[in-house]
Image: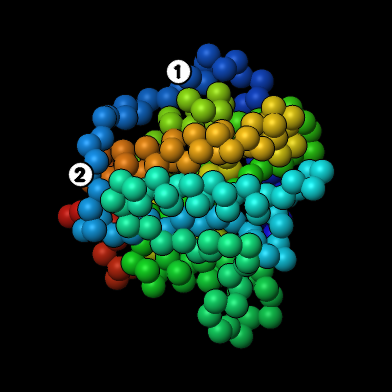
Amino acid sequence: MANCCWRICTALLTAVLTWAMVPTASLATQTQVTVPQVPLEAFSEEGGPVLIDPGHGGIDGGTSVGGILEKDLVLDIGLRLRDVLLKEGCPVVMTRERDEDVSHRYPSPLRSRHARDLRNRVRIARESGAHLFVSIHVNHSSASGPRGAVILHEANDPAGAWLAELAKKQLFGITGRAIVFPNRSLHVLRRAPCPAILVEVGYLSNPTDRQALLDPAYRQRLAEALARAIRAYRITSPVPPERQKKTPIPAFQGMALYGGPKWT
Ligand SMILES: [Zn+2]
């Protein structure tokens, strides 16, 4: 997923900078999601696995500042999220559990390593029967001001939007700033066979975020916040009717993912 954060950042720079000027108090009032208390038994094998996708890896370090690499931070958070979910009985699949990209996971005629890497992440989701796709990244801006979490979901995926709102609610309590953006261009969001979000947990370019991300305890809190969002999503399914997709995306047709009796 080389350069994905740069592309996201470029596309959203104006919006994020605008958002960064909004007082924190008003951001808090934007959150309309009520997250209920969740019993541990909400997790079950029946729900299918959650795919955790730590971005980048191996030759692809992602964004970096002063030798701090995105790929290392997101792997650590992903592994922590894995452990939290497994401890609570939630089945989990990882796209990677060490410092590697996944471009060679499956044979492919594609010449682009980046393209193979992205497609393989989606293929892992498809072949594992994942019911949720959570891709974890760290953001970067040319300015040092923007900070906080950015959660992206495919624009035509109401279930992903619902999960994104739940993640925003939880991450806001950790990062102090969290915002959701619909997206129409990211491959893993467009092609994921299930509701998907891409979470930028903070800005490496912001000194406050960077310092926080270097703290293992902070990364643990991020992982636990994401786990709470996933838990909340599972028990609040099916997706509220007003958020259900009206027309399936062609690539998803025949997979009975939208409009089915269960969303878990
Ligand atoms: Zn990234």
Q: Is residue 93 visible?
A: yes
Three-letter amino acid code at disc 1? Thr
Above or below 243: residue 135: below
Mark 2: few/some/many CA within 10 Å (<14, 14-19, 20+): few
Residue ID at (32%, 57%) = 91
Where residue 130 appears, as percent x and y from the top left, is 36, 62
Seen from the viewer's position, the closer of residues 99 and 190 is 99
The residue at label 1 has a CB less than 8 Å from ligand 1: no
Q: Is residue 146 visible?
A: no
Q: Going by the picture, which residue comes out furthest to the right?
A: 66
Three-letter amino acid code at disc 2? Glu
Q: How many marks?
A: 2
Residue ID at (20%, 44%) = 41
Q: Secondary structure at mark 2?
A: helix
Above or below 50: residue 40: above
Please tell me whether mark 2 or mark 1 is closer to you in this view: 2
Q: Going by the picture, which residue comes out furthest to the left?
A: 261
Residue ID at (72%, 66%) = 59
Residue on which the image places disc 2: 41
Mark 1: few/some/many CA within 10 Å (<14, 14-19, 20+): few
Q: Which mark is residue 93?
A: none
Q: Which mark is residue 29?
A: 1
Where residue 132 appears, as percent x and y from the top left, is 37, 54
Above or below 182: residue 79: below
| In the displayed structure image, the side of residue 250 where residue 240 appears, left or right | left
Where residue 257 appears, as percent x and y from the top left, is 29, 60
Q: Secondary structure at mark 1?
A: helix
Comes first in the chain, label 2 or label 1: 1
Image quarter of residue 32: top left
Residue ID at (42%, 50%) = 83
Seen from the viewer's position, the closer of residues 122 and 171 is 171
Where residue 217 appears, as percent x and y from the top left, is 55, 34
